[in-house]
Amino acid sequence: MTYVKVARLTLILVYLVIAAGAIVRMTGSGMGCPDWPKCFGYVIPPTEESQLMWAPGQSYSKGQAIIWEETLLMANSDFTTAQQFEMSNWVTYEKHDYATFNVFHTWIEYINRLLGALAGLGTFALALFSLKYVRSRPKITLLSFLALFAMGFQGWLGAIVVYSVLAPVKITIHMVMAFAIVALLLYLIYLTTSPDADHKSNNTVRTLVIVALFMTLIQVILGTQVREFIDTQIKTLGENNQGNWLTDPEITFYIHRSFSILVVAINLYIFYLIRKLSLGYNKIGWVIGLLLVEIVSGIAMNYFDFPFGSQAIHLLMAAFLFGVQFYLFLEVNSRRNAMISS
């Protein structure tokens, strides 16, 4: 397998993690595993609540969990329970006081973590494959190991999110970091792929693409703020009261909705310039298509009471949009640099 194939596979895995994360948010499964990196102290989490209930004659390994009187307890050693519960065998989990088991939520979060581990292995393999460039193109090796470090940092952020019981700011940072990893992998793919010679340089388009890229990132951050408001509404109004989740929304919602008009406008103008000047950047068509799906999913959430899957689609399309825009920027910027050097 070649370096670029490993990079592309790793990118796919990262997008699968983003998709899984979107499903976790959509289903409210973020605390499905209340500890990290294991899940209720198990490598493979329980499938029934009875597995987390104390029972006599049950063998436990150090770190395995039970829920006792609405408290999460961890075994402090390997032992087998006696006929009576003995608190001396257990320690209270001190990272937070969340102690609920829902098999649906637990396994959604667990699959999310499995995909994250696979993406981590992908970046590890990428770093190893990059060693062939250590003399000829050391930049690739350096950035590949940076991607590995970034993935490890992302895993640590995931733990912080769990320990904070899904603190909104930490969730937003976690999402932005995922986008940074996507950008880094795309850059590595671009560096090891032959550029399209049919592209033409244009400084105006280059500037607009940069602005559009940052506008997308701002829009995503605004979207996470809206999602946090919805999470609060769900806790207050209930999961089955979708029609009222956006009743009297915060100002962030209106900013997010209005800002989307600007995002669409600037990308349509970029599309117009690229076609008019025959610059050859075909990925702008992907951008417009992704924006269309993004708008439709946003309208569905707002006016049709959050149909199933619309939230996950909305976030995933934003992630794809950012990735395509970033690669478009790399293409535009490369042609500018080529023109300068010639």
Image (cartoon, rainbow, N blue to C red):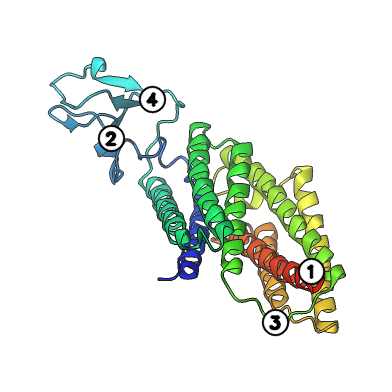
Between discs 4 and 1, the one toward the N terminus: 4
Of circles 4 and 1, which is in front?
A: 1
Q: Which residue, given by chain and number where applicable, does mark 2 sit on?
A: 52
The spot of residue 226 in percent (x, y) is: 69, 47
Label 3 packing within 10 angstroms: few (<14), some (14-19), many (20+): few
Numbered mark located on residue 69 in the image: none
What residue is rendered at 78% in x and 79% in y?
A: 200
Between discs 3 and 1, the one toward the N terminus: 3
> Can you say which quadrant of the picture contains the C terminus?
bottom right
Q: Mark 3 and mark 1: span between their CA atoms?
A: 23 Å
Using the rendered image of the protein, determine whether residue 263 is visible from the camera's viewpoint.
yes
Q: Which residue, given by chain and number where applicable, does mark 4 sit on?
A: 93
Q: Mark 2 and mark 1: span between their CA atoms?
A: 52 Å
Q: Mark 4 and mark 2: span between their CA atoms?
A: 14 Å
Q: Which residue, given by chain and number where applicable, does mark 3 sit on?
A: 197
What residue is rendered at 28% in x and 35% in y?
A: 52
Of circles 2 and 1, which is in front?
A: 1
